[in-house]
Image: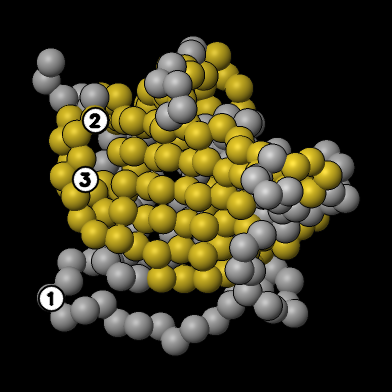
Amino acid sequence: MQHLRRRLICSTGVIACGLIAACVTAPELSPPQGAATVPARDLKAGQYWEYAVHDAYTGLPRGVYRYTVARLDATQAVVDVIQDGVHVDAYVYAPGWNPIEQPLTNLQRFRYKPPFPAYEFPLYPGKTWRRIVRATDPITGKSYSVHVHARVGGWRRIHVPAGEFDALQVVRYVYAGNAEFFRLQEEITQTDWYAPSVGYVVVNEGNSSHIDTSRSGGGRGRPLRVRGDWLIAELVRYSGGSAELRAPQ
């Protein structure tokens, strides 16, 4: 989800690596003794999650988005995106909610190879991963090396319009690799609160910025940092694939 529309919906400290579309490997750590782990959940055709989106800068509403599992097989799921009742897009995910094709926060739509590492199940507090993927714009054919640094935070009881849920924080720092001329690469922060009982996030937050070296405004002659949208999505209702689920009013 990382990613609620084409504008929303991912150049500090990038890992040096000579491999494109390959993993930045690190020893796999075991969960701390006694820690609760969260496995990936199977999807069902017809499942949906509906979110109310607002602008974090202004507080103004930015629409209601519904994500519906349209079709799926063993390798991928196609999720229809409905904005305020109108079909606007379809995203493609690998198992475990890892995007194969969808927009990156505040940037255009990309195809990712390997899939964008939004999650690495099982999840548990303290887990981290760092990966590099190739992101290709399907319209222009341009490709970029996208670096993803992710960590799993702690548990929190989250209240949203759909109810209260125990959710695990997942934070991703994404470096888009799309530097061109005077514009440095987009630096993105994505924060999810993943609720196992829902099978997806109950809150999603995304924002980004980049440095424009042709413009001053950072103080003392420093180049200007240009900030993109900062949008927050909160779960309104969801379905298990047959019956709608919503908190009592």
2 or 1: tag closer to the N-terminus? 1
Q: Is residue 71 above or below residue 156?
A: above
Closest to the observer, 152 or 217: 217
Q: Mark 3 falls on what kind of element? A: loop
Question: Of the residues under marks 2 and 3, which one precedes in the sequence?
Answer: 2
Residue type marked 1: Gly
Disc 3: which residue: 197
Residue 96 visible (yes or no): no
Marks 2/3: CA distance? 14 Å
- The residue that mark 1 highlights is 34
Closer to the eye: label 3 or 1: 1
Q: Amino acid at mark 3?
A: Ser
Mark on residue 160?
2
Q: Residues within 10 Å of mark 2 (few under 14, many from 20)?
A: some
Closer to us: 43 or 161 = 161
Mark earlier in primary sequence (3, 1): 1
141 with respect to 211 (left or right): right
**Callout 2 amino acid:** Val
Provide residue 47's location: percent of width, then percent of height. 37, 34
Classify mark 3: residues with Cα within 10 Å, few (<14), some (14-19) or many (20+): few
Residue at (40% x, 64% y) in the render: 151
